[in-house]
Image (spheres, helix red, strand yellow):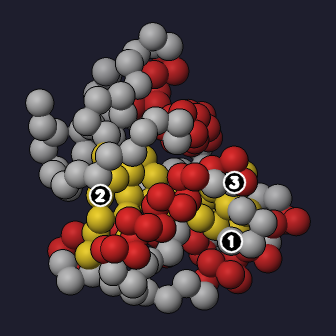
Amino acid sequence: MKVGDTEADHMNRNPNYPEPSAAGARLVLFDSADPSLTAGRRERRSRILAMRPTDTALHPLVERARSFPPLGAHWEYLRRDGVSLLVRARDSADAEDARWDATRIFSAISELQVVYVRDQRSGHLGWWLANDREPVIVSPRIWLGSQRTGLQAHVKLALGSLAEPKAWGEYSAVPRD
C-alpha cells in the first residue's frame, strides 16, 4: 500500500487483494464499564447516527436513531487486523443480551438496506444498514465528502463480510498471527 492510502484505495487499484476479514475476523463486545475503549467509539457512532440519509424519504429514521439510550454493551465486527468493519447502532443491556442481539441481526441481514448518510454542516459521509424502522448497523468511521469512492468500497467490504460465519473474540489493537 502507498503511504496515505486507505485499504479501500489499495483494494480499488488491486482487485485481487485478499479480503482483510477472511482470517481472524471476529465479533467483539465493548462493555461500558471500560470507558477507555467505549467512549470514543460511542461518540463516533453518535455522530454517524446524527447524520441525515441522502434519500429524504428515509429522514424519519434519524429521529429513531437519536432515541437510542446508552446501555451496558455494544458489539462490533472486527477484521483480522483489529479494525472495525461493522458497528451495532444501539447498545444492549449486557453481554448476554448483546450476543443474542448479534445472532438475531445476522439471521435477518436480508431485511436490511444500505443507507448513505451525510452531515449537513461538514459534508462528512457515513452509512447505515437499516430495516424499515431504524438503523441497525453503522459504519465504523466517518469519511470526508471527497472520499465517496472509499466509502463505497467500505460498504462493499462490509456487505461481503455479512455472509461469513461470525465467531466471538477479543479486542486487540495488535493483529494476532
Q: Residue at point 28% right, 69% down?
A: 30
- In the displayed structure, 32 sits above or below 54; it is below
Give the left or right position of residue 24, taking residue 138 as reference: left
* Residue hosting label 1: 134
Label 1 with label 2: CB-CB less than 8 Å: no
Give the left or right position of residue 110, taking residue 87 as reference: right
Snapshot quadrant of residue 74: bottom left
Distance in Å between CA atoms under marks 2 and 3: 21 Å
Amino acid type, residue under disc 3 in the picture: Leu
Q: Secondary structure at mark 1?
A: loop
- In the displayed structure, 143 sits above or below 33; it is above
* Residue hosting label 2: 28
Q: Residue at point 70% right, 83% down?
A: 63
Q: Secondary structure at mark 3?
A: loop
Residue 148 location (% of width, % of height): 62, 40
Label 2 vs 3, first from the N-terminus = 2
Q: Secondary structure at mark 2?
A: strand
Determine crowd level at label 3: few under 14, some 14-19, many 20+ residues with C-alpha closer than 10 A: some
Give the left or right position of residue 98, taking residue 128 as reference: left
Q: Quadrant of the N terminus?
A: top left
Q: Residue at point 38% right, 58% down?
A: 76
Q: Nearer the viewer, residue 105 or 60?
A: 105
Distance in Å between CA atoms under marks 1 and 2: 22 Å
* Residue hosting label 3: 112
Q: Quadrant of the C terminus?
A: top left
Distance in Å between CA atoms under marks 1 and 3: 10 Å
Residue 109 location (% of width, % of height): 63, 50
